[in-house]
Image: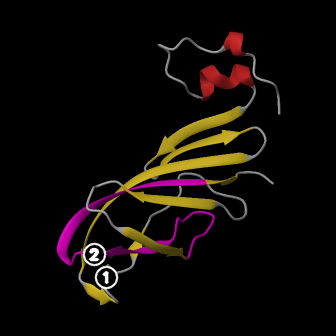
Amino acid sequence: MAKINYQNLPSTSTPLNATNLNAMQEISTSGSNTNGYYIKYEDGTLICRTTISRSFATSTTYGNLFESPQIDLGSTPYTFVGDYQLSVTETSGPGVMIEGTDNKSATSYGKMYVLSAVSRTSYNFTFDIIAIGRWKA
């Protein structure tokens, strides 16, 4: 990995993107599509970010909690090579726990369940998804 030359960074009024950061020789490319945003680094690191909204109920009894149906997290904006770390955070405010993810693949974030202390017949949830892995071996 090349060293960062801090004197050649864009001014703070310039949006940061792959075009004006290539002088640092760390970001290979960045972009977005209907599945979210991605940044590819020269060393092979890939970071993907997506925000999704889903409406569903948390009404199935699960011990002292209530569980949602299985929720599809959608497709990744760029293909991962090998396994990657996934973080899903609920940002809409009702305070829920995310119960594992299943069926994760190179092009899909997989599926998950939501646990809530409150039974809801329907609620609009928003989730931030960040995945870190590799785009090249």
Query: Where does residue 96 sit, x and y in percent of width and height?
Result: 34, 67
Is 84 left or right of 55, judged from the image as shown? right
Residue 112 vs 107, above or below: the answer is: below
Residue holding disc 2: 117
Where is the N terminus found, in terms of image quarters?
top right
| Secondary structure character of the magenta stretch overall | strand
Relative depth, front residue between 90 and 22: 90
Assess whether residue 133 is covered by the magenta stretch: no
Name the residue type under label 1: Leu
Residue holding disc 1: 65
The magenta segment is: 103-131
Residue located 63% across and 64% down the image? 106
Query: Where does residue 100 sit, x and y in percent of width and height?
Result: 50, 74
Residue located 66% across and 61% down the image? 84
Could you classify mark 1 by the number of other residues whose Cα lies within 10 Å: few (under 14), some (14-19), or many (20 or more)?
some
Name the residue type under label 2: Ala
Judging from the image, what secondary structure is the residue with disc 1 in?
strand
